[in-house]
Amino acid sequence: MHSANEPAAGEEGLRSVAQHRPFILFWCGRVLSTLSFQMLSVAVGWQIYDLTGSAFDLGLVGLAQFLPMLCLTFVVGHVADRYDRRLISSICMWIEALAAGALAVGTLQGWLNREWILLLVAIGGAARAFESPTMAALVQGIVPRALIPQAAAWTTSATQTAHILGPAIGGLLFGLGSMTAFVVSTVFFSLGGLFVACIRGSQPVPIKEPVTLRSVFSGLVFIRKHPILWGTLSLDLFAVLLGGATALLPIYAKDILQTGPWGLGLLRTSPAIGALLMSFYLARRPIRSGAGKILFRSLFIFGLATVAFGLSNNLLLSMAALVVLGAADVVSVVIRFTLVQLQTPNEMLGRVSAVNSLFVGTSNQLGEFESGVTAALFGVVPAVLLGGAGTILVAWLWMRWFPDLRKLEKLEG
């Protein structure tokens, strides 16, 4: 097996990443973990709304996932830069498996209420706070640098594949009984941890500097000193924070579109279908020029698709809007992932990835909370429409505040 620093002959084509065993193990672990998380999201969302009928409680689920990430981000980054990233990732997946297993046991024994659901979601969120940035930092150690843009597209494809299959499977399994979805998630989390634990040949983490306040926050400092990274991460943070409507999908499925868990599964799957198609396209035709303009155009489309979804009362039309939304969103995902990997040294990658994960988590989980609160105050449809308009406004502002990002041509260099 060759070193990640020394790509062997023949590793320059698209298939070379698929033939790189450490990356395949990483890819499988990432798919199973994301698949399990998406299945749990559908099952937990539907179950807590069925128990309470409250849009605010749906928002609390997102908040329970976000708060551990907010509290642990800078600790996570330092741990990922000091210890075995492979081992950290696998242990986190096994903790998430235990949380999913507890949801299954609570459902079976009848003691699972709103408080227990939020507590177990928070425990899983804490483990995921460690897993996500550590897995992202692991890529640079197991993939030759020349193949990182390709690996970014493959990793995004893996995530979006799980986003497609997870909600659909979660909705179907929940239809058979919520405990079924929790049990399958437990098994998949466990297998994902096993795949990651089997990775060999990753680069040793070089950092052994003393733990100081400066070193803990150095990831954030590094990002602030690089305007392109700062503009990209903050843009994604605020655009998706305002435009996130996924927390309200159970309400749309049940009250507006008049469907059941299967309809919720289809709605949650639709953005991932668009994202998967776009990620496959980007894997074959990567962004080589005009990256900044492409980024901003995709966010305008994201906002418009959110507005279209908010106005729809037809399941097929809603799914089509979500497909476009997912395709637009994945463009910024690939650009952000590639920029972080190529512009960050390995000894800093854990801390930078942790800050990146905090931004992503803020835009997703806190965005769900924001959507729940807005829906409770103004109604479901106005909340989605305001979110779409907010995304467009943020993109317009960032075009003026970050001119270097708007003029960005290439992702590398």
Image: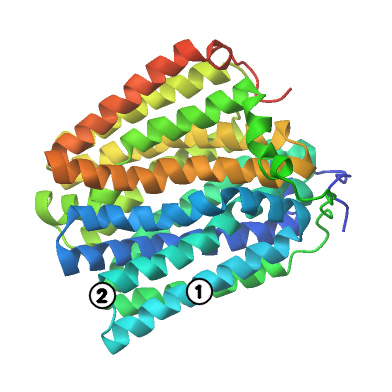
Q: What quarter of the picture does the C terminus occupy?
A: top right
Q: What secondary structure is found at the residue carrying circle 2?
A: loop
Residue type, label 2: Asn
Residue 256 visible to the viewer: yes
Q: Is residue 335 above or below residue 35?
A: above
Q: As drawn, is 162 to the left or to the right of 262?
A: right
Q: Residue at x 28, y 30 (%)?
A: 388
Q: Is residue 340 above or below residue 135?
A: above
- Report crowding for label 2: few under 14, some 14 to 19, many 20 or more residues within 10 A (C-alpha): some
Residue 312 visible to the viewer: no
The color scheme shown is rainbow
Q: Residue at x 50, y 40 (%)?
A: 359
The image quadrant of residue 311 is: top left
Q: Residue at x 41, y 59 (%)?
A: 38
The image quadrant of residue 407 is: top right
Measure how far apart labels 1 and 2 are at the Cα level: 19 Å
Residue type, label 1: Ala
**First of labels 1, 2 by sequence position:** 1
Report which residue position mark 1 lands on: 97
Q: Residue furthest bottom?
A: 109
Report which residue position mark 2 lands on: 113
Q: Position of residue 125 (x, y in %)?
A: 47, 60
Q: Position of residue 49 (x, y in %)?
A: 20, 62
- Report crowding for label 1: few under 14, some 14 to 19, many 20 or more residues within 10 A (C-alpha): many
Q: Position of residue 242 (x, y in %)?
A: 33, 34
Q: What secondary structure is found at the residue carrying circle 1?
A: helix
Q: What quarter of the picture does the N terminus occupy?
A: bottom right
Q: Residue at x 69, y 38 (%)?
A: 218
